[in-house]
Image (cartoon, coloured by chain):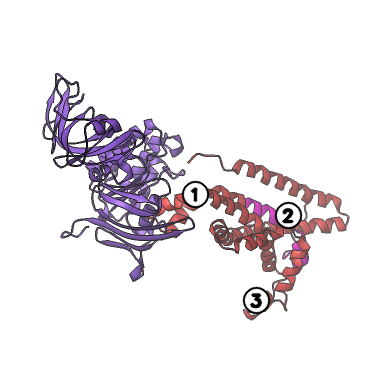
Amino acid sequence: MSPSQAAPSIDAQLRLERADFTLDVTLALPGRGITALFGPSGCGKTSCLRSLAGLDRAQGLVVVNGEVWQDDARGLWLPTHRRGLGYVFQEASLFPHLTVRGNIDYGLRRLPAARRAVALDQAVALLGIGALMERRPETLSGGERQRVAIARALAASPRVLLMDEPLAALDAQRKAEVMPYLEALQRGLDIPVIYVSHAQDEVARLAAHLVLLRAGRVEAAGPTADLLARLDLPLAHGDTAATVVAGTVLSHDATDQLTTVGFSGGQLQFASAGHRQPGQSLRLRVQARDVSLALALPQGSSILNAVAVRVTALQEDGPGQVMVALDASGTSLLARITLRSARTLELAPGRTLWAQVKGVAVLG
Amino acid sequence: MHLSAEDWTAIGLTLKLAGLTTALLLVLCTPLAWWLAHTRSRWRGPISAVVALPLVLPPTVLGFYLLVLMGPAGPLGALTQSMGLGTLPFTFAGLVVGSMAYSLPFAVQPLQRAFETLGARPLEVAATLGAGPVDRFFTIVLPLARPGFITAGILSFAHTVGEFGVVLMLGGNIPGVTRVVSVQIYDHVEALEYAQAHWLAGGMVAFSFTVLLALQWWQPERKSP
C-alpha cells in the first residue's frame, strides 16, 4: 500500500476559514504509530481531523502514505467514502437500527475483498466485544458502545484511523476500561492512528508523536517525550507536567516485587505486581512533582531512584514554584520544586546534580 | 348496506386519487424536505412559507389559481398543450396535481422534521465506512427516518381523502373521473338523500379516526443513540 522506498508518512496542508477562527496548519506526521493532536478546546483539533477525513472542506493538500486524498492545486478531492479511512467520533454514534454485528459489518461489507487487512474476528477480539454481537446499541453501556465504534472503524481495514477524543464522553471508570484496548490496538495492528485529545495523560500514554495546536495553528510538533519536557510549551507546566522515559526491563525481583528498568540515564526501580520479562521494552511516565533534586547522591533515603542529571533550563511555574528541565544522558526529565530550593541549590543551566524519582507509572 | 354503485365508484376514485397523490408526494417531497432540513440558503424561509401555504389558504383560492395556471391560457396549460396532453382541469390527472398541491405540507413537514432529527452524524459515520450518497440514503436515511415517512404517508393520504374545495374548483363533478366521496356527499345532501349521505359521512369519520389513532401508534419512540 505504501511506497516501499519512502518512509510512510501523512502530509497535509489545510486551510479552513470559519466565522470565529481560521485553521491554517501544515502537518508532516509519521505514517505509523499513534500521533496525537493536542490542544485546548477550540484550538482546531477536531476541524483538523474532520478536514483530513473530508468531512469538512478545507483548502489544501492531503497525502496519506503516498495516496493523494486532496490536492486543490490540481483540483483533486476524494469524497470521504473513497478515502478508505476509519473515524471514531467522540460519541460512539452507532447506527441505532442495526445490532452490534450489523454496525461492525457495515464498513466491512463495503470493502473490496482485496483490501481486507483486518478480519472481523480480529477487530472483535481486540476490542473484547464478542459477547455483545447480537445486542442493540441502546442496551450497551457507554464504554461498550465506544469499543464497538472502534471495532466498526477497524473492521473496515482503514489506511489510517482518525479518533476524535474517543474517551472524552466517558467517565473515569469507562475510560480505564477502554484505554487498554487502545494500547492493544497500537501493538496489534500496523495502522497509523491520529488521535485528538485535550487530556495530557492520554497523550503521554498513547502517542509516540505529538502535534500541539493553538488557535488554529501548529505550535510545535515532534516526538512526545521531547515535547512534554520543553519549558517553552504549555505541556511542561502545572501540576500535570510529566515526561516519558523509554527503557528496557533489566530484572524483576519476585520477593520484593520490584522491577528494574534500564534507560539512557541509568536505572529506575518500581514496585509492580505483574511479572515482567527481562528485555521487554517499557514506557514509564514520570511526573514533575515526583522528582526532587539533590547536590549529592542521597544516602539512606526511602526513595530508591537517583539519576545523574544536568539542568538544561528552568522557569518559574506558579507562585513559589520552579519547573526544572533536566537531561539524563539523552532522556528528558522535569522536576517541579520550590523557588527557595532552586535558589538554595543555585540551579542554573549546565549544573549537574542528582534527581530523586519518587514514583513512576507504567504506560505499557 | 345503503351504498349505491355511484357511491362505490366515488369511494374507489377517492382511494385511487389519495394513493397516487401520496406515492408521488413521498417521492417528490423527499428531496425538497432534505433540502429544507439542511440548507443554509436565504431561500429556505420563503420556500418553507410557500410549502405551508395550503395549510392556511381556503381550498377555493388554491383551486382557483390552479385552474388558472392549468387552463388553456395558463403557463402550465400551455406546457401540457404543447406536449399534446391537452389541458388538465376536469381530468383525473388535473385532480392529482391539485391534490398534491393541497396535501404538500402534510408530506413535507413530517419528512423535514425526521431529517432534522436524524442530523448529519449517522451519514458522516456511514461515509467514513465507505458508503456513497445513494447507499447512505437507502441504508441509513430511509430506515432511520421511517417514522417520518409513515407519518407523511398517512397524513397525505387522509388529507387527500378529505379534500373538497380544490376538487370542486378544478375537477367539477364528473362521475368516475372527478367525483370523489366528499363531492358525492355534497350531492346527496343537495338531493336531500340524508340516509346515503349518512353512510358516506359516517365512513369518513370512522376512517379519519382510525388514521389518527394509527398515527399515535407510529409516533417514533424516544431512543438514546
Q: Respond whether the residues carrying marks 1 and 3 are from the same subunit.
A: yes
Mark linked to residue A115:
none
Q: Identify residue type, mark 1.
A: Pro
Element type at mark 1: helix
At x 65%, y 57%, the residue is: B105
Report whether residue A268 is seen. no
Asked whether the beta carbons under mark 2 and mark 3 sit within 8 Å of each other, the answer is no
Mark 2 and mark 3: Cα distance apart in space: 27 Å
Query: Which label lies toward us, 1 or 3?
Result: 1
Q: Respond whether the residues carrying marks 1 and 2 are from the same subunit.
A: yes
Q: What chain is the red one?
A: B
Residue matched to label 3? B80
Residue span colored magenta:
B153-178
Q: Respond whether the residues carrying marks 2 and 3 are from the same subunit.
A: yes
Mark linked to residue B143:
1
Q: Can you tell which quarter of the image residue B93 is in?
A: bottom right
